[in-house]
Amino acid sequence: METDEIREELIFAAQEAALAERFGIPADALVPLLFSLRYGGDWSYAAEGLTAISAVKKTTVYDDERLIGYSLEEIFLFVDPLLLHREGTVYRLEKCGSAPARLLVNRPYRVRLGARRAIKMIVNPLERTIRVEDLDAAEMTFTGSTAYGIDHEMEHLAGREICGEGLRAFRFG
């Protein structure tokens, strides 16, 4: 790694570390949020007396005239989340962790989630900006992919792994 890259990494890491103090939460609670930023996807974390999950909502913003766009990412962090309501059923293929292949699972289409604390990070790749804000909401509702991710991460916090049918249940047409 070059000296400039090391310097940039240290500056970025210091900015990440400052978030815990800025929002007055334990640094451990930020693990899912920072993993979503660095590695993508949804994450969960549990330690004694603390649970947290992150969920990513992606929106493609595209300008048809200029023929340019970007994927805006809203990364939600929920500290001590509680799943309040699940609604609907969506069948989908998922793979998690060291599982050898994807499984057919069902997830709720809509979830309502409560949390002791909710923070939103907005990542704009075109502007190369990361905004972080405290959400005053104690409850939030999500649909679609974000709801599936929340449901999946709540499974992890409950100590459960995904379960469903293997691909061999499918038939080629």
Image (tube, helix red, strand yellow):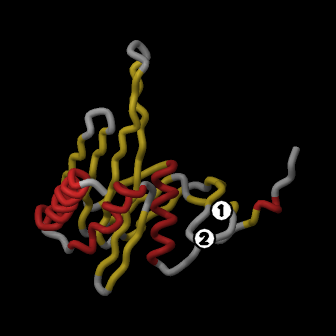
Residue type of the residue flagged with mark 1? Val
Quick one: label 1 or label 2, which is nearer the N terminus? 1
Asked if residue 135 can be seen in this view, the reply is no
Q: Residue at x 40, y 23 (%)?
A: 68
Question: In front here: 81 or 74?
Answer: 74
Q: Position of residue 127 (x, y in %)?
A: 26, 34
Q: Position of residue 144 (x, y in %)?
A: 51, 48
**Are the two marked residues, 1 and 2, in contact with CB atoms closer than 8 angstroms?**
yes
Residue 105's disc number = 1
Q: Is residue 25 left or right of residue 128?
A: left
Q: Position of residue 159 (x, y in %)?
A: 50, 81
Q: Residue at x 40, y 52 (%)?
A: 56
Quarter placement of the N terminus: bottom left
Q: Residues within 10 Å of mark 2 (few under 14, many from 20)?
A: some
Which residue is denoted by mark 2 in the rendering? 162
Q: Is residue 68 above or below residue 166?
A: above
Instruction: Please tell me whether mark 1 sits on a helix, a strand or a loop.
Output: strand
Residue type of the residue flagged with mark 2? Ile
